[in-house]
Amino acid sequence: MFNFVRLKTLNTIMKQKIYLGVWGAVALIIIATLTRIIPHELNFSPLGAVALFGGAYFLNRGLAVAVPILATFISDLVLNNTLYKSAQGFQWFYDGFYWQYLAYAIIVFWGASILKNVKVQNVIVGALGSSLIFFLVSNFGVFAMSSTYTKDVAGLMTCMAAGLPFIKTTILGDMIFSVLFFGAYALWTSKPSFTAKASQIFAK
């Protein structure tokens, strides 16, 4: 039987928001970058969860948007010049990178909207919405830039259908990392000794 008492307790803890600042952003960028460059399944990434988390816990929206974008840029810089190294030499960006950045920016504002009240149910809905946003934006980017698909509704639907096999790992990554980020942060900030320290360090 589902334990509604535990859910209510966890929701109460998660509602106790401590907003993050620059040092919180730096910590998130490091975590997201390191997590992304280690071997993983295609599209299994912490970045959607980072954007969602940033939308909930950064009052500065510019900082919230900068976190997943900087983490993406740094990890792409490493991956594109090591694991996916091109014969063309050092690569700063890849074609269509801005579609991915746009997706994360939208997810930040989605998170700010859906997670004004942070609780378990909203985090789950937020994570699923993040996966859908990333799927739609990134696949629309492929459709817009590729000559493979006809530039009509049929071509767009074909492109979206081609991307469906990859959405499973996107959802899995967003769900797992959202649970980890929001759950760990809620439990961490629930400690009385942390609340005072967090306001002095992470909120700066």
Image (cartoon, grey):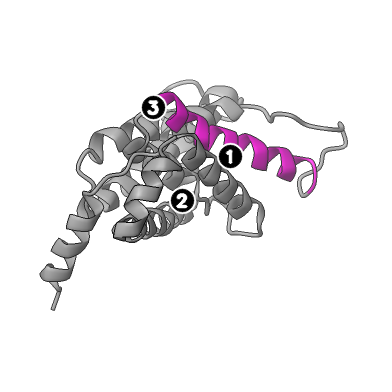
Mark 2 or mark 3, earlier in chain: 3
- Which residue is pictured at 17% across the width and 69% down the height? 6
SS category of the residue bearing label 3: loop
Q: Which residue is mark 1?
A: 71
- Which residue is pictured at 49% across the width and 20% down the height? 151
Q: Residues within 10 Å of mark 2 (few under 14, many from 20)?
A: many
Residue 56 picture location, percent across and down = 32, 39
- Which residue is pictured at 66% across the width and 38% down the height? 74
Residue 98 picture location, percent across and down = 56, 25
Question: Left of 91 or right of it: where is 181?
Answer: left
Nearer to me, 186 or 56: 186
Q: Which residue is mark 2?
A: 170
Q: Which mark is residue 148?
A: none
Q: Amino acid at mark 2?
A: Thr
Image depth: mark 2 or mark 3 in front = 3
SS category of the residue bearing label 1: helix
From which residue to which does the magenta span run?
60-82
Q: Amino acid at mark 1?
A: Ala
Q: Amino acid at mark 3?
A: Asn
Question: Left of 144 or right of it: where is 33?
Answer: right
Q: Are marks 1 and 3 in contact (CB under 8 Å)?
A: no
Residue 137 occupies quadrant: top left
Spatial separation of the CA atoms under disc 2 and disc 3: 26 Å
Of the 4 image quadrants, the one containing the C terminus is: top left
Nearer to me, 99 or 76: 76
- Residue 165 visible in the current orientation: yes
Q: Which residue is mark 3?
A: 60
Nearer to me, 201 or 182: 201
Of the 4 image quadrants, the one containing the N terminus is: bottom left
Q: Residues within 10 Å of mark 1 (few under 14, many from 20)?
A: many
